[in-house]
Image (spheres, grey):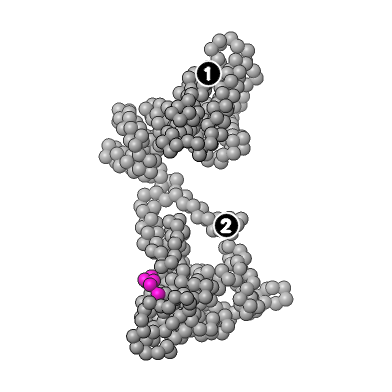
Amino acid sequence: MRHRVLQRRSAWPALAAEAHGAWHATGDPDAADGGADGGARRGADGGTDAGRDAVREVAHDLEVAVTAVVTRDIDEVDDGTLRDELQLLTRTRNRLDARRSAVMSALSRRDAARARTARPDNPRAGEQAARQLRNDLAGDLGLTHGEVKQAQQLDKRLADAPVARAAFAEGSISQRHAEVIADCLQHVADARRMAELDAELTEAARRMNPVELGKYARGRLIELDNTAAEEAARARRQRRSARLSLTPDGYQQLFARLPGIAGETVATAVHAFRRPDSPGEHRTPEQATADAVVAMAEAALASAAAPRQHGVRPHVVVTVSEESVARSRGTADTVWSGPLPFDEVEDVFDDSTVCRLVHDARGVPTEASEGVRTVPAGVYRGIVDRDGGCIADGCDQKPQWCQVMHLGVPYRFQGRLTIKTAALGCSYHHDRLDRRGWTVTWFDGRPVLHHPDKPPRRPPSRGDPP
C-alpha cells in the first residue's frame, strides 16, 4: 500500500492514491482489522499489528501529501492551476467524508455487537453503546453529536443506493448530495423504482448543487410514487424545529427548519417584509432578511391577533430609571435580552406607551401609573396623510416601513407630539436624525430631512416653515 505525490501542470502537488484495503474509500472498514495474512497477531481490540502498521504508513504519507499542498505559495500559482486544485481538493474531501462515514458506521456496529454479546439480558445494550460512542467521537473529533450521528447513519442508509454510494466514495458527489439521495430513497418500497431513482439522482447530483437536487428529487418522487412522497412529507413535518436563544454576546439567535407549506408561509412573509434599501443605506442580504424578520414580529405584536395575557396585548417592555432618561445614558433593562445601553432603546420613546413605576428601597414596585401613548392616534393619521412615507430627501419608503420621529423636544424631556413636531422616517433615516446630525427643512408645510451639508433637492413651493 503506497501513496505518492505527483507533479501536475504548474508543478503544484496533487494527491494521487494507489490505495487498497483499509484506506481505500470503497474498502470495507469491517475487514480492516484482519489484514491480508489472516494469521497476524491480534490486539485487545481485535486489530492486527500488520493492520496498524499499514494505517500508520498511510497516515504518514497522507500527512506529507497534505502538507505539500497546503504549504504551497498560492501567489506563485496561476488561476487555471488554482481552479484545478480546487476541483481536486473538493473531490478529495468528498472521498474522505465518505471514508469517515464508513469508519464511524463500522465502529458503531462493532460497539453495538460487543455490547449485545456482553449484556444479552439488556435489550437496549446496543443502542446505549452507540450513544456512548457518539459522545466519545464528538469529543475526540470536535463535532456535535448530531454531526456524528448523521455521518454514522449515512453509510447505512446508502446501502440501498449503490450508485450514489460509489459516486460518494469516488468523490464525484458531496456528503450533502448523498444525504439528499438517501432521504429520497428511504421512502421508496419498490426495488426497481429505487434503483432507477438511485441512478437518476446520482447523475443529477453531478451537475446540481444540493438545494437544486433536493427540489428535483422531491418532484421526481411525487411523479413516480405519490404515496412515498406523502410519507416523506409527513416525515419532514415530524422533524420540524425552531430554536430562539440568547447568545453570550447579546444576540437573539433564531434557527428554524420549517417544511412544506409552513416553510413557504414564512418565506412569503419574509420576502413581503423585506424592504428595499433607503438612499445611502447599504445592507447585506443577511441584514435585509434580519430586518424583515423584525418587521414581521413588529407587525404581529401590533395586530389584534396576538394572544393577550391578563387582558394586555404582548409588547416589548423596556425599563429605565428617570435619571437615565434625563441624562440620555445609562442602562435599559429588557425582559428577554437583558441590559442594553440607553442609546439603543432611545427611539422606543418616540412611539410607545409610557407607564411610571415607583419602587421602594428594596427595588420592589409599589405603584404603577396608567399607560400614556406618546403618539396619539389622531397625530399619526395626520402625519401619514401629510408625509406619505419617509420624509428624507430622495427616500421612498412607505408608511408601513416607517417610524414616528420627534422633530421637537423628545418625549423623555416632556415633549408632546403634534402634527408639527412629528414626522415619518424609516429606521435608517430616523437614526440619521437622532444620532448623525441630519436636519429638517420645511417646504410649504411639509418637512424634508437631509444632510446638513447638502441642501434638500425638493424646491419650496409655497408657504413658510411653521
Evaluate whether residue 157 shows in this view. no
Q: Which of 452/150 is in front?
A: 452
Determine the residue positioned at 63% across, 75% down: 324
In the rendered image, which residue does mark 2 sit on? 246
Mark 1 — residue?
2
Q: Secondary structure at mark 2?
A: strand
Q: Quadrant of the C terminus?
A: bottom left
Q: Residue at x 44, y 49 (%)?
A: 257
Q: Position of residue 70 (x, y in %)?
A: 54, 34
**Callout 2, which amino acid?**
Leu
Compared with 194, 289 (above or below) is below
Q: Position of residue 3 (x, y in %)?
A: 52, 21
**Mark 1: few, some, or many residues within 10 Å (few <14, many ≥20)?**
few
Mark with earlier residue (1, 2): 1
Name the spot of residue 447 as percent of width and height, x first. 41, 81
> Is residue 111 depicted above or below 239 in this figure?
above
* Residue type pointed to by label 1: Arg
Given this view, does label 1 or label 2 mark the residue nearer the observer? 1
302 within the magenta span: no
Q: Which residues are magenta?
A: 393-398
